[in-house]
Image (cartoon, rainbow, N blue to C red):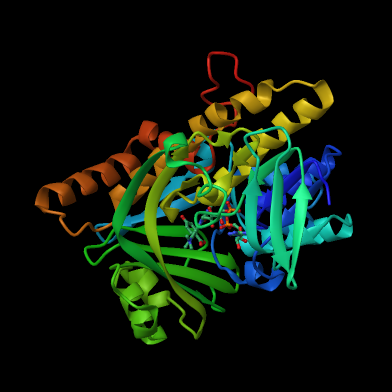
Amino acid sequence: MRTKVAIIGAGPAGMLLGQLLHSYGIENVILERQTKDYVLSRIRAGVLEQGTVEMLETLGITGRLHAEGLVHEGIELLFGGQRHRVDLTRASGGKAVTVYGQTEVTRDLMDAREAAGLTTQYLAQDVALHDFDGKNPRVSYTKDGLTHELACDFIAGCDGFHGVSRKVLPSSALQTYERVYPFGWLGLLSDTRPVSNELIYTNHERGFALCSMRSPTRSRYYVQCSLDEKVEAWTDDMFWDELRRRLDREAAESLITGPSLEKSIAPLRSFVAEPMRFGRLFLAGDAAHIVPPTGAKGLNLAASDVHYLSHALREFYDDKSSAGLDHYSATALKRVWKAVRFSWWMTSMTHRFPDNDGFATKLQQAELDYVVRSSAARSSLAENYVGLPYSFGKPADGARE
Ligand code: RFL
Ligand code: PHB
């Protein structure tokens, strides 16, 4: 089999890249290790930047997103027992975010791909990348006991943090940067009415909590937990009690509880691998970088990476120019690092660290108070939360978006 771009991974990065390339007439094949249902069962992101929504709009697949997604013009910060609203739209000059689950984005992309008759190989095992440092890369994999080979012009490694694409690179070719946080998030999904119309990010002495949602009847809540905790040890009642303790009185009293549809623990980490290109292999999304979910940036970064990469590939095929591909890594990393900074800042300001002393706690309180009282600080939070423009920080050396 032969294609132009072999995409490893059918998460948001791979599926979105596949559709963008298809819209430019660039043939591609997606290889995914898991089944379609497995990919769709992972409850992850919930907040889409306006730029991500606009990208999906250009693909003509936002019918369900606009019908079911919830446009949010603000978030609430809860600290010192009081909630403070940050008006994102006012502070960002008119922008907003859309609450629409990652599972739904992926499903819409999968449906569009199927409708267009494009090839996705699910249950592709033992995926291996070959000759990506030359002009004729190949990807081999096994399926149903048979070995297959896919010849291509380029490989896009969109296989997440634990995928193979980054791992095939010699360690001398990559510089990695990492911060592992000493806590995780315990998340619970339930068919209950959300406690508030907007998201509540909470700094509490017992730890961070987040009240989010998927729809007017489906809630997503998180509480900070320690890394050695086991999800099985948390009954639903224990979760609801812990969440209630971290909320203000009004929210605690109006919190509607119910059986969990899903419960899981996610560790928090910042990680960046540089560069995001090695010969004809390009990394995108979680394969190249991870951010803690506090800033709601992971999926949105996957989207901006594939925006840059799809433009660069279009330029290669249409204009016979490699300039966009040559600048892909530098251009994408500029935006990645700003999201790494924002996610680290949101995490630092809202979580309880094991070594938090009185000084660190006072600084957090001062930071939160500053954010809600200073219009400059609110604007800074808002412009990052709704998503920095894709051209932000364009390299001065003429690198293209
Ligand atoms: P994914 O989603 O991990 O998809 C990678 C795909 O590659 C497949 N794969 C392989 N396929 C073939 N061969 C191999 N050897 C393979 N190895 C792996 C996998 O099966 C999978 O299908 O990466 P991608 O596409 O880069 O997307 C990244 C996002 O999923 C991630 O950044 C977000 O979920 C992060 N995130 C959030 N992002 C946001 O923008 N807004 C949010 O509100 C938000 N909330 C969150 C989050 C992540 C969370 N967790 C669980 C880490 C909340 C949480 C709790
Ligand atoms: C979610 O709804 O899962 C969610 C929302 C905002 C975040 C992280 C996760 O910052």
The spot of residue 380 in percent (x, y) is 42, 34
Q: Seen in the image, is 12 located left or right of residue 22? A: left
Quarter for ligand 1? bottom right
Residue at point 71%, 39% (across, down) = 154
Q: Quadrant of residue 146?
A: bottom right
The spot of residue 265 in percent (x, y) is 41, 70
Residue at point 75%, 73% (across, down) = 144
Q: Quadrant of residue 233?
A: bottom left
Residue at point 49%, 63% (across, down) = 212
Q: Residue furthest top?
A: 397
Count of numbered circles in the view: 0
Q: Seen in the image, is 150 located left or right of residue 134? A: right
243, 197: nearer the viewer:
243
Report whether residue 301 is seen: yes
Report whether residue 101 is seen: no
Q: Seen in the image, is 13 located left or right of residue 234? A: right
269, 380: nearer the viewer:
269
314, 361: nearer the viewer:
314
| Above/below status of 184 relative to 261 | above
Q: Seen in the image, is 393 located left or right of residue 62? A: left
The spot of residue 354 in percent (x, y) is 18, 60
| Above/below status of 193 relative to 163 | below
Residue at point 55%, 56% (across, down) = 163
| Above/below status of 384 relative to 147 | above
The spot of residue 257 in percent (x, y) is 46, 82
Of the 4 image quadrants, the one containing the C terminus is top right
